[in-house]
Amino acid sequence: MVRRVRDEHARYTRPSKHGSRPRTKQRPEHADAVTGMVVGVDRGRYTLVIDDGGPDEREILAMKARELSRTRTVVGDRVDVVGDTTGDEGTLARIVRLTDRTSVLRRTADDTDPYERIVVANADQLVVVTALAQPEPRTGMIDRCVVAAYDAGMDVLLCLTKADLASPDRLRDLYTPLGVEVVVTRRDSPDAVETVREHLLGRTSVLVGHSGVGKSTLINALVPDADRATGVVNDVTGRGRHTSTSAVALRLPVPAGTTGRVHDGWVIDTPGVRSFGLAHVEVDHLLAAFEDLDQVAAQCPRGCTHLADAPDCALDEWAADAPDDGTRATRAARLASFRRLLAARTATV
């Protein structure tokens, strides 16, 4: 019998515990992927709508691929999915790509928190829903929402509810100089919701507001099948109870009598908020949202804060030197409103 002697110079390849397939950084192209919009998120499962509202539109359930495990995916995101995209009960697709976002609405817990929370993606309009009474309006909160929207490159619509209880004039005068559109609703006017609908048609709008301001009631009127829970305002604290627990995107039906379409835009409901931190917002980003002020501010001294106590701020001269034919008052109001937004970045709400 021949005895086998081990060659100490021989190299042996250990079998991999992960299998014999070589590792590679190349990922599949997923050329057969379909694109959908995230309309709901629940414990690691994503509800998507596939297609654009045509007869083949369907809802599917999906989870993220491993390579996207650290990628934040939120309502409004458009994603590519593979696998079973039929939407049949019990099926689960896989999200393999996140497409480029057109906008990102962010907030922080407070003005010192470095962690940004993405509220929604790809919305083009922020609707700030505020009651004129019960609960009382908080202009500091409205200011912060406006700042966050302008920082994200979004338009702002201020929706004032419960106008049967108080006048909207003061808030309208505060925000129209900032280019904010204002729409007013009344509980005793069922047609008021149609005025709001006109501002939402063909757009992706995210609704934000304190609990108890009538946000869920408004959404139920705009989208009759939404069935969003509504709450009441506490008589002692003057605050509402949180009824929406997570963001959800809903198709906005077209007005009655319209043919050829079953929807015309999206409304995204968000949970009621008590704070809107702006630690992520830079002054230059906010200033860029006001083209006329941005051009004038280029003449300011280096390091100018543009606030009311800033020395030699060019914005003061711009407002004071305007013709006294109404232009001066208009510029002064716009500058005061802009400075109020600047102050809102660090003020307590």
Image: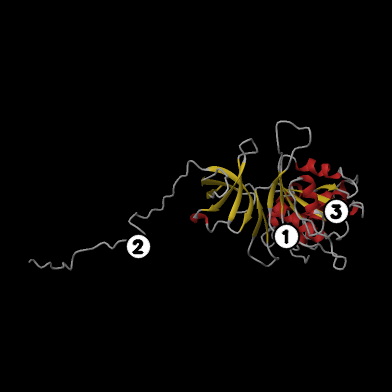
Above or below, 27 relative to 144: above
**Disc 1: CA contacts within 10 A as few (<14), some (14-19) or many (>=20):** some
On the rendered structure, is 187 left or right of 297?
right
| Distance (Cα) linking label 3 and label 2 | 67 Å
Above or below, 112 relative to 255: below
Q: Considering depth in this image, is 155 or 193 the residue closer to the camera?
A: 193
Kindly identify which numbered label has been placed on residue 304.
1
The three-letter amino acid code for the residue at tag 3 is: Leu
The three-letter amino acid code for the residue at tag 2 is: Lys
Pointer 2 or 1: first along the chain: 2
Q: Quadrant of the N terminus?
A: bottom left
Q: Considering depth in this image, is 269 or 344 the residue closer to the camera?
A: 269
Residue 298 visible in the snapshot? no
Question: Which residue corresponds to mark 2?
Answer: 17
**Quadrant housing residue 214:** bottom right
At 64% across and 61% down in the image, what residue appears?
Answer: 116
Give the image location of residue 276, x and y in percent: 73, 61
The label nearer to you, 3 versus 2, is: 2
At 54% across and 59% down in the image, what residue appears?
Answer: 70
The three-letter amino acid code for the residue at tag 1 is: Cys
Helix or strand or loop: what does disc 1 sit on?
Answer: loop
Give the image location of residue 117, x and y in percent: 65, 60
Count of numbered circles in the view: 3
Question: Which residue corresponds to mark 3?
Answer: 174
Q: Quadrant of the C terminus?
A: bottom right
